[in-house]
Image: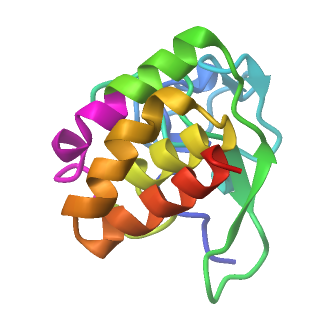
Amino acid sequence: MPNGGSDCCATCWFNRTNRGEAGYQHRDSPGEDHCEVRDLSIENPFYTYCANHPHRRPDRDPIPIGPVERFAGDYSTNAREVWQPSPDTEEIRRHLLDLLSEIFLHIPADRYPIGPSLASVIMRQLGEFREPRAVRDLEWICDNCPDFLAKPARAALEQIQE
C-alpha cells in the first residue's frame, strides 16, 4: 500500500506524538496522534493533511490555515477531501489576510507536488469565509498575476461577492 505523502500529520511537528519535531523519527512513539494547532485527535495520521505542515509552512505557523484534509482513497490521483473545516475566528481571518498581502513570499517554499498550494488554500479559505477585507488584494492578484494565482483569486472573489 502506498503511503499518503510526506506532508501528512504523522510527520508534522504539530502532532503531539512527534514532540515538536518534523519527520518520521517518532512514527513508533507511544501516545495519541493529536494536532496541537487545532486541538484535534488524528485517527489516521499518515493520511491526514493541512497547510500548517512544515512542507507548506516551514516557518512553524501555529495559527490554523485552511481545513484538515484526508486521503480520499484514489491512489492514482492522490485525491484529498475536507475532513474538518477551518476554524473561523478573527485571529485566523487576520492571519490569512496578512498571508494574502505577502503571497509572493510563500511561493518559493510552496513547491510540494501533492495537494493544494499554500497560496490557493489561503485564498480559498478567505473566499469560504466571505471575507470582504480580502477583496482588494484578490482583485490585484486577478489583474496582475499568472493564472496559477489568478484562478484561485477569482474563485475566492466570486464566493465573497455572492
The answer to whether one can see residue 47 in this image is: yes
Rendered location of residue 63, percent (x, y) = 51, 18
What is the x, y in percent for residue 21?
40, 25
Q: Which quadrant of the figure has residue 60?
A: top left
Residue at horizontal 26%, vertical 61%? Answer: 143
Q: Residue 129 in the image: state x and y as whole percent.
A: 67, 34
Residue sitting farthest toward the bottom: 76
Q: Residue furthest top?
A: 91
Q: Nearer the viewer, residue 135 or 102?
A: 135
Q: Which residues are magenta?
A: 99-111
Q: Residue furthest front?
A: 161
**For residue 19, side relative to residue 117 (left or right):** right
Quadrant for the N terminus in the image? bottom right
**Residue drawn at 27 percent across, 49 percent down:** 140
Q: Nearer the viewer, residue 115 or 28?
A: 115
Residue at left 80%, top 48%?
Answer: 83
Residue 130, quarter of picture: top right
Is residue 131 shown above or below 31?
below
